[in-house]
Amino acid sequence: MHIPFDGSYLMVNLVSILFIIATQCFAIFIFSLFPAITLIISIGSMVGSLGATLSGVTFPVPNMYPLIYGASFLFPIRHYTLIIQNMFYLQGSYAYYWPSVIVLCIFPLLALLILPRLSRAIYSHKYEEIE
């Protein structure tokens, strides 16, 4: 497509895989907090739309209100967007995007920490009868 790119295609693929894992772990984390399927469908759609809005693709995040700017870093898509933009616009220098890579690595740890709560909720069967 003749897009100027001085970075590494391997790094783009590795970061994309890390983003997918972080997003799935973020979903596990949220489902562990609210294990009722009826609640998680609504919360998942809300989190998905907020993540897409606060990622910085449609509107520059630094120009948002300070509280919204801070909240944008709670979503994996924001960090992925920062990494990809830095790869494309700053010639792929790892020095610019390593903090976002670290944060994407934290999301699986969050899911692992709260997984026992999800396990207890699944085995108790108390969330199956919520309407």
Image (spheres, rainbow, N blue to C red):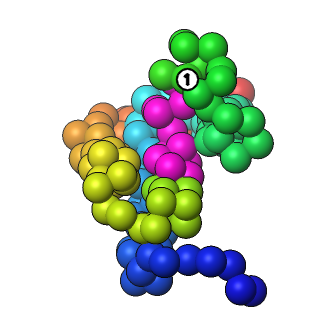
Residue 17 appears in view: no
Examine the rendering and report whether any part of residue 55 can be seen. Answer: yes
Image quarter of residue 116: top left
- Residue stretch in magenta: 71-82
Residue 88 picture location, percent across and down: 55, 66
Q: Could you tell me residue 56's position as x and y percent?
A: 65, 41
At label 1, which amino acid type do we have? Answer: Tyr
Quadrant where the N terminus lies? Answer: bottom right
Quarter where residue 52 is shown: top right
Q: Horizontally, is 106 left or right of 131 in the view?
A: left
Q: Nearer the viewer, residue 19 or 10?
A: 10
* Quadrant of residue 37 within the rendered picture: top right
- Residue farthest to the bottom, as pictured: 1
**Residue beneath the point at 62% across and 31% down:** 61
Magenta-colored stretch includes residue 72: yes
Where disc 1 sits, the SS reads helix
> Which residue shows up at 41% across the image and 40% down it?
29
Q: Is residue 77 above or below residue 10?
A: above
Question: Which quadrant of the figure contains the C terminus?
Answer: top right
Q: Which residue carries the number 1 mark?
A: 69
- The reply, left or right, for residue 114 in relation to residue 61 is left
Relative to residue 126, is residue 104 depicted above or below? below
